[in-house]
């Protein structure tokens, strides 16, 4: 990856909808050369996916809750079973397997506490043999939210 690729990645992280011509002008290449580089960045795994970032407010999902979970045991099959369940849960926006006192941290985005309580009831009902305990941290204010990564050499 060279400086041109880094510039392209930075521009796409800012706005994946930016026209190829704008990128081409910024990096002083032809539009077709930029499109080939973007295709290569996708093929090589630098660009995992291009998505639309939906406004939580626009879809009435403004309550963000971090949920710390402790699993009964950390056997491979147990972890895989739990991860499959999390992957199917539409309320879970992100999930991390972590070190420390807890095993997983989930970012759950819901409409209100009633929807969150329904999620927890489903979690504890369907995963009661796996989840030992959980702790909820309700976000009062989003200070920073982003997906962009630093693209430096």
Image (spheres, rainbow, N blue to C red):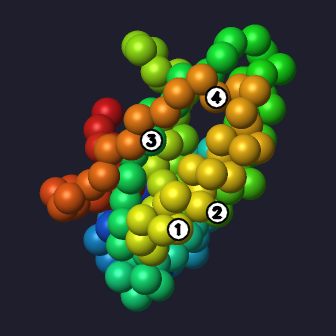
Q: Quadrant of residue 124?
A: top right
Residue 3 screen position, x and y as percent: 34, 47
- Where residue 12 appears, as percent x and y from the top left, is 41, 66
- Residue bearing mark 3: 67
Q: What residue is shown at x 68% (from left), y 52% (from top)? A: 122
According to the picture, the residue beneath numbered tag 2 turns out to be: 90
Foreground disc of the pair 1, 2: 1
Q: Please tell me which of labels 4 and 2 falls first in the chain.
A: 2
Q: Is residue 10 visible?
A: no
Q: CA distance from mark 1 to mark 4?
A: 20 Å
Residue at which label 4 appears: 131
Outermost residue on the bottom side: it is 58
Residue 21: quarter of image: bottom left
Q: What residue sits right under mark 1 in the picture?
A: 115
Q: Residues within 10 Å of mark 2 (few under 14, many from 20)?
A: few
Marks 3 and 1, how far apart at CA: 14 Å
Which SS class for mark 4?
strand
Instruction: Look at the picture and state if 68 lies above or below 102.
Output: below
Q: Earlier in the sequence, mark 3 or mark 1?
A: 3
| Mark 4 surroundings: few (<14), some (14-19) or many (≥20) residues within 10 A | some
Q: What whole-number distance in Å separates the C-alpha atoms at marks 1 and 2?
A: 12 Å
Q: Quadrant of the C terminus?
A: top left
Q: CA distance from mark 2 to mark 3?
A: 15 Å
């Amino acid at each position: 990856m060279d400086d041109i690729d880094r510039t392209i990645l930075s521009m796409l992280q800012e706005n994946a909808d930016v026209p190829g011509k704008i990128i081409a002008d910024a990096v002083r290449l032809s539009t077709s050369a930029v499109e080939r580089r973007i295709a290569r960045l996708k093929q090589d795994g630098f660009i995992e996916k291009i998505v639309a970032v939906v406004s939580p407010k626009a879809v009435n999902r403004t309550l963000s809750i971090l949920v710390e979970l402790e699993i009964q045991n950390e056997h491979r099959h147990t972890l895989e079973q739990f991860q499959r369940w999390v992957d199917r849960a539409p309320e879970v926006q992100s999930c991390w397997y972590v070190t420390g006192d807890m095993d997983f941290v989930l970012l759950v985005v819901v409409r209100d506490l009633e929807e969150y309580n329904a999620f927890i009831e489903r979690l504890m009902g369907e995963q009661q043999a796996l989840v030992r305990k959980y702790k909820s941290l309700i976000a009062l204010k989003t200070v920073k939210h982003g997906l962009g990564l630093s693209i430096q050499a």
